[in-house]
Every structure is written in C-alpha cells, then in structure tokens.
Image (cartoon, grey):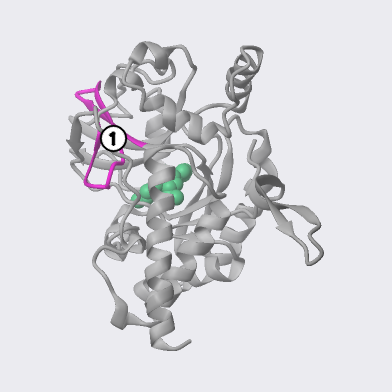
Amino acid sequence: MTPAAANQRITALRAQVTHHDELYYRRAQPEISDYAYDRLKRELADLEAEFPQFASATTPTERVGDDRLAGFVTYRHRQRMQSLDNTYSEAELRAFHQRLVKTFGREDLAYVIEPKIDGLAVSVTYERGKLVRAVTRGNGEEGDDITANARTIRSLPAELKAAKKFPVPDVIEIRGEIYFTTAEFQRINQEREEAGEPLYANPRNLASGTIKQLDPKLVAQRKLEIVLYGVGFCEPAVTDSQSHFHELVKHWGLPTVERTWQATGADEIWGAVGQLDKLRHSFAYGTDGAVVKLDAFAQQREAGATSKAPRWAIAYKFEPERAETRINAISIQVGRTGVLTPVAELWRCAARI
Ligand code: IVH
C-alpha cells in the first residue's frame, strides 16, 4: 500500500471506529457486530503501526470508548479505568505471554484466567465498607455517576462483610461489569412482545441503556446484575494478587465471576481458555471471551500499560459460533432490459443471546 493510500484508509477507519464507538458506548445501539468492529479497529491499528508518520493523538485506537451522557454528574476515578487489548488467536495469546517473558526474563509467570463478561464496565467505591458511589468507565479518567441506579441492583451489598482474615480497606474502587442474565433479558423482551413493542437486540445493550436511565425507579423495574473482578484504587492495600483479590471479594459478600483458573506459562493458559470455552454457556451471563491477567500485582505494576490498556492483561475473544444475518436494506436493481430485481443488503452480526 502506498503511503497516500494508507493515509486515506487510516482517515476513513478513524471516522468509522469513532462513529461505532459513539453508537456502542453512548447510545447502546451498535450497528455492527463486536467482531466486525474489532476487525476495523485491528486494521486501523495495523496501518498505524506500519505508517507511524500518520500518528494522531486523537486516534480511537489510543483511547477507551467514552460512555458519558448529558444529564449525569461526572466523577473522576481515583485510578484510571482502562480497557483491554483483544486477541482472536492462540498465536497472539502466546505472543502476549512471550512479551512478558522478555520483560521479566523468566518463563514461569503465573496468571489468572477469568470469563470476559459481556456487560458494561463500572467502578464501585466502598468507603469504610459502605457503598458510596458507582461510576461508569466514561473516558477512563471520569465517568457518569450512576450510584442511585446501581443501588437498585439487589445483589450489590450496601455494606461489605468484614472479617479478621478479610480486612476491608478504608477506600476501595472495585471494578466490574453490569449485565442482564439471559433469563431476565428474555423476560423483558417477552413483556415487550406482548405489548407489541419492538424487541431489544441483546442483553449488553439493554443493560447499558438501562443503567443510563435518569430515573432509578425505571431501573428498579428490571433486575440488573453486577459482577466484580478487579481492584482500582485501594487504600490501604489489602491484597497483592488477583487470585487473592477474588477470595476477598467473595468473603466481602460481593458477586464475583463464576469461575477462575490459575495457570503458569502459555500451555496452561491455553488449556484454561479451552475449559472456559466449554463451560461458559452454563454461566448466567453472556461471556464473549477469556481475560488473562498476570497474578502478582507487583508484576502488573512492572509490566505497565499503554494509554488504553494494561500490558499485564489481555482478552482472548471466542469466535462467534453462531451468526445471525439481518436484512439491513433492500435496494432495487434495474436490469439492462428494465427488469427490477430486489437485492437484500445483508448484515451479519454475532448472535449472543
Ligand atoms: S479487566 C485494566 N476482567 O472488558 C483491566 N475486564 O474489552 C481492565 N470485562 O473494559 C479490565 N470481563 O469492561 C476485566 N474479567 C474481566 C472482564 C473485563 C469483562 C470488560 C471490561 C473491559 C472490557 C475490555
């Protein structure tokens, strides 16, 4: 590709990705599947790497999608909320491990593997064990304050259970995901069908749209759920590894991921990802991948992060095994002899329901 053509394509891709980010994060109404979106973003990232002369500080590959909406008070996270880099192949997953092997000069790195929950990212803050705030990721620096809505989530305790072995810190930002179970999503859609209303496309978008309602009473009518899987700011530090953090979260009485795996090295990571793939359909929430995280927080700190994602974690996305084809539009083609032929413009999207 010539530099001029690359420049043109990069500009077009930046506009497309920005457009789809807006639809997904802010409006909760994506037009394309996650898979198609990831492909566009990957093509952009590859071209940016090949043609560094067209670098831009505002490219969507260097920032997290912004979900902030008018009508909400914004709140600055004590610690930045990042996204994750995605991979789709075993080779890329192994390359992730190899980069860390190079950083640390050792092969026996320990990881935790977790389900990647298909919801929307949230940060909940507990001060002296009491729930004080829930905030969306926003632009990573600051997000929308959704505390009143999050308080309607029955599984989110207003107070953490403290015990000698599981001390509660003075202040902790806990990261997680808000979602709908498949069952609740179907119940809501059934109600809509009976009322003759259009159906919601998938649980993730419905969860995202629901938590961004301005009236908590409306939110309370639907049974949103939450799962917590990460620590942001924490003072004083009460844990030094992801695996121990999972234990703490459970003992504090918070909903946590259904299963985690511990693995050392690339073969074990791959084995765990395979096990998760077999099990994930039995989970209450949609799982579109595995998240692989270095276990030791000291190693996480040393590995560091890019502007958008940590270098110590990666998401491995499962191939969408079912695809749904939608007719996006029907155009009429006029043949040479004047015959009119309707042509369907098809849009393939991953079915996650
Ligand atoms: S860790 C700094 N763990 O996936 C690391 N994220 O595509 C931050 N997600 O923004 C994320 N399940 O909203 C992590 N077990 C999990 C997750 C998870 C779902 C979401 C999260 C993140 C997005 C990236």
The residue shown at (18%, 41%) is: 78
Q: Is residue 313 visible?
A: no
Give the percent coordinates (x, y) of residue 263: 53, 56
Q: Is residue 86 visible?
A: yes
Instruction: Name the residue nearer the viewer: 72 or 342.
Output: 342
Give the percent coordinates (x, y) of residue 178: 43, 31
Q: How many numbered discs? A: 1
Q: Which residue is mark 1?
A: 69
Quick check: is 125 in the magenta stretch? yes
Locate residue 220 relative to residue 349 in the image: left or right: left
Give the percent coordinates (x, y) of residue 40: 49, 63
Q: Which of the 4 image quadrants contains residue 56?
A: bottom left
The residue shown at (44%, 19%) is: 155
Q: Which of the 4 image quadrants contains residue 211?
A: top left
Assign a secondary structure to mark 1: loop
Locate residue 220 relative to residue 324 in the image: left or right: left
Q: What span is colored magenta in the figure? A: 122-144
Give the percent coordinates (x, y) of residue 96: 47, 68
Above or below 133: residue 292 = below
Tell me the quadrant of the picture where the C terminus can be found: top right
User: Is the C-beta of the residue carrying label 1 under 8 Å from the nearest atom of ligand 1?
Assistant: no
Q: Residues within 10 Å of mark 1 (few under 14, many from 20)?
A: some
The residue shown at (39%, 36%) is: 176
Instruction: Name the residue nearer the viewer: 89 or 29.
Output: 29
Q: Which of the 4 image quadrants contains residue 333?
A: bottom right
Magenta segment, prevailing SS (helix, strand or loop): strand
Tell which residue pokes out farthest to the front in this image.
338
Quick check: is 77 in the magenta stretch? no
Tell which residue pokes out farthest to the bottom in this image.
2
The residue shown at (49%, 35%) is: 205
Which amino acid does the dot numbered 1 rest on? Leu
